[in-house]
Structure formats: C-alpha cells, structure tokens
Image (cartoon, rainbow, N blue to C red):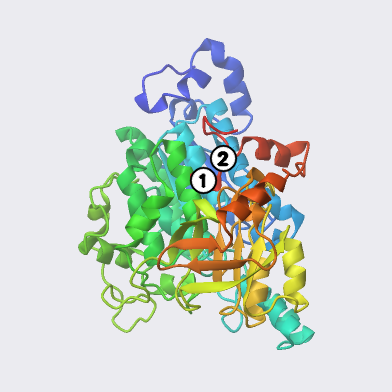
Amino acid sequence: MSEQSDPRRRYSSPVVDGLGKSASRAMLRAVGFTDEDFRKPQVGIASTWSRVTPCNSHIHELAEAASGGADAAGGKGVIFNTITISDGIANGTEGMKYSLVSREVIADSIETVAGCEGFDGLVAIGGCDKNMPGCLMGLARLDRPSVFVYGGTILPGENHTDIVSVFEAVGQHAKGDLDLIAVKHIEETAIPGPGSCGGMYTANSMASAIEALGMSLPGSSAQNAVSRAKHDDCEAAGAAVLELLERDIKPSDIMTRKAFENAITVVIALGGSTNAVLHLIAMANTIGVPLSLEDFTEIGRRVPVVADLRPSGHYMMSELVEIGGIQPLMKTLLDAGLLHGDCLTVTGRTLAENLANVAPYPAEQQIIAPLDRPFKAESHLRILYGNLAPEGGVAKITGKEGTRFTGTARVFGSEEEAQARILDGTVVAGDVLVIRYEGPRGGPGMREMLSPTSAIMGRGLGSDVALITDGRFSGGSHGFVVGHITPEAYDGGPIALVHDGDEITIDAEADTIEVNVSDEELMRRRAAWQKPTPRYARGALAKYARTVSSASTGAVTDLPDVR
C-alpha cells in the first residue's frame, strides 16, 4: 500500500493509495502493475490507433514507444484508445457528417478516461485531421502536464501522387482526360502505406500549428510516419511528461494568446488548410484564450506564404522533412520578428531557446522561399464579410486562380447534388456554386467539400468556377472556394436566401463576399423562408446539432452560450 508523498502524483494518489484503495490496486495488478508502479506518476497514453485509415494504422507501435519512454523516465505508462474516422474514405457521403463530430467525441473521451482513471500526465498521439485538434482539446480541458505527438506523414505515391490525386482523377475521367484503367492505377498506387495525407493538408497543417504552439517536441510535425525519428519522438514525449510533472508545467502555461499567434503565423507561412482556422479557434476556446476570425486577418497582413507545398504548390510534406521540416522556417520567422520567442513549450524551454541552434535550409532547396521573395506577400487565408456572410466566411485563395470572381449562382441543397452536376457537365464556366444546409447544425456536421472541389479541378474549371458553402473544405481543396459562411443556412443566414441566377462577387483583396440583390429583396425572401426540419432526430448527429456553436466560434459543443 503506497502513501502520498510525491507531488507529481496529484491525480493517481487518490485512486491507488491507502487501504481503502485495495480494490483499485487489485484491478491494476491484473493489467501489469507492480507494487513499485503504484508509487510512480501515471502517464496516460491516448492512442488514436485504428485500422480504419492509413493515417492511424501504425499508431499502436508509437503508443508503445511513448509508454516505454514514460516508464524509462520513472513513470508508469498506461495506454488507452480513442476513436478516429477517415475523411478520405467518407468524403462525399452521408458518413462524412460524423467527421467534425468525431473531434468532440475524441476530446470528450480523453477527458473522460483521464479524469476517471486519475492519470497525472498525458501523451496524446494523433494522425489525422480531427483527432489532432480533438486530442489538444482533451488535453486542454484536463490541464495536466501533457505532450502531443504527431503520427507522421505518408510517403508519396507513384508519380508523386497522393489522395487528392485520386479525387482529381475522377474529375479528369469525367472530362475525358483519363480512362478507367488510368484512374484505377492512380487508386492502386497513390497511398503506399501508413501516415497522414502527404501535402500541406489539414493533418500536416495542424501538426505544424501544434508544434508552433509549443505542445509538441521540436521536429514532431515533420517526420515520416514510419521512421526511426518518429519512434524516437514518441519515446522522448513519454519522458518529457515526467519533466513537465516535475516542474508542474501544464497546457494552460503553454497554450497562451502569444502561442496561438505563433501557430497562426506558421500555418499562413506554410500555406495551410482553412480547417486550421476552425480548429485553432476551437482549441483556444477550450483553454480559455480569446481568439477570433479577425486575428487571422490581422496576422495575415504581415505574414507571407513562403511554402511551395500541395495542394496549391508542388511539393509534399515528406520532401519538406528531407530538408529539415519546419524548424528552419520557424527560426527564420523568429529572426524576422514574426514569432514570439518567449513562449514556453513542452521542452520546458522557450521557443527561442528551442530554435537557437537550428541550422538554415540547404541553399539549393526550392520548397521554402525567402521572406523577401514569397509566393504570396500576404496570407492565403482570407476572412470575408458582406451581405452573404455578415459573421464571416473563410477562403483559401493563393492568387493562382485570381483574387476576384463575379459569377452567377447555381444553388444546391447538398454536396451530392452539386457533385452530380459537376460531373455531368451542368456546371460551366462563370458559375458560383452555392452548397448550403451543410453547416454545423444544418448538415449536421459541416462536411468537407473535397469531392466537388476536386471534380472542379479535374474538369479544368479551377479558374472559371467558384464554390461557396456553409460547410467547409478539406486541406486538399484548392481553387476559388469560400467556406464556413456564417450564419449558416439552417439558422436563416443570407446564404439560405440566394436564388439561381443571382450575381455573386467574391473579392479576396477587399475581403468581401456579396450577392447583388437589394436589401428589400432579401427581406422579402427572408419572410418567405422556412427553417428546415432537422435531418436527424436521435443519435450523435442530432445531439451535435443541438449543442454545437457557430463555425465562427470553432463549432465547439461546450461553450456556455451554445443553443
């Protein structure tokens, strides 16, 4: 029977100490605890391992390495699982409505297990879009010494392909540019093994943001999924939690306002996903840090896009790994005064201290441009307002498809409707596709529009068609696209009032999105509008729709003012 004497055991001590906890100890002996283990700090290892998706199929081995690292440092690692889903598999189906919901389930489950079992510290290992911010939100709620580990990026497929190549091949076939044999060959070779989608899509964007935030060890965001470096990263994370416990450094000490500004800066510099806007605001809300859409605009005015990474660029994350990952970029941004160097990180040191001895990129590399010769002088993430989005919308506009678009509305009530009309040739140059009732409440679940945007690109309409939605986009989407439009259609937002044939203008320089319809006409349409019946009456989607907040506040389910 152990007695409380170690301040690092604040949470495990009430679970295992004293005669009254004999039953607890008996249960734990059955899963491998010894007398000595009851005197050690317990480190929960939250694993998102699953054979659902290649992004997470290797994470059990990483969890074992993290647990071993915690054990070697004097703790007791305890592995537990949380869920994951696959956006790449579910995209374009009704099942994709569960994607954003899974982020909340993951946060809930990590909080639930750690809160119940009395873990003193945690390592969370995520490898796909939603489980990464879900992990961070769970760690933030618990506010116990914690480290996040990224599961790592996948390697390129044959001929430099990836999952987006497969989606775009479908559009190329519809256009007549690829036959079925060629599409099948891309399908068979684009995903060569474990790891997250290979471009600067949402997983790699969020991994980079979390490292910049200070919640991962240096280098964690830019390692191949199957590599010695990733195994060592996990072992080091397990050990790092013991040091954080010794010093009582918690997520709330690290996830500060300045740290979130650092994360936004790095996402912009890398040309990252629009989903980073949604997830960073959600994570900030969870830890109690004020963060809003306007912060992305303000920071974006001074931070350029310097990475030539997919989807808008050429290179993949594995190629950035080869030249040093994001650490040299962060050092460059720090030296230019664009990062806050005094932010504390999970190393126990500041960001500036972590970066002090980082070497620059090789001189001959072409992936990261100099700050004075960027690919885009300001952010590609544009927060748009106007009579179509009075509470904001989020666009990812690199400038390659232009910065201003005026076209004619072609309105769809779901993603499936739009996809069918893109593939059959109904959608033509000059159209602005309006996909509505796909928001957090209306969908419910705020589906990604990767299938439609990929079909548009595959049909060669990337510069000739715009797409706006109260849903969201995959990090793999590119083109003239605007998502997260708020208020959403289900709440009676103006996007619900658009008719076929209305003229819509998107201006990514003035940061506006307008439908050319008079206020009087919009009022007349509003008077005739009726709120749709909820699509789900029971179950997880119905519960989510009743509790979720607006996309402009991160689409979280635990804000006090959630309706």
Disc 1 + disc 2, Cβ < 8 Å:
yes
Residue at screen point 68% across, 74% down:
455
Q: Nearer the viewer, residue 146 or 306?
A: 306
* Residue 484 drawn above or below residue 380: above
Residue 251 disc label: none
Residue at screen point 71% across, 75% down:
427
Residue wearing tag 2? 549
How many marks do you count on the picture? 2
Residue 121: x %, y % from top left: 44, 35
Amino acid type for the residue under numbered disc 1? Gly
Binning the other alpha carbons within 10 Å of mark 1 as few (below 14), some (14 to 19) or many (20 upward) gives many
Residue wearing tag 1? 554
Q: Secondary structure at mark 2?
A: loop
Q: Secondary structure at mark 1?
A: loop
Q: State the quadrant of the C terminus.
A: top right
C-alpha gap between disc 1 and disc 2: 7 Å
Report which quarter residue 369 is drawn in: bottom left
In this view of the protein, can residue 67 be seen by the observer? Answer: no
Residue 146: x %, y % from top left: 42, 40
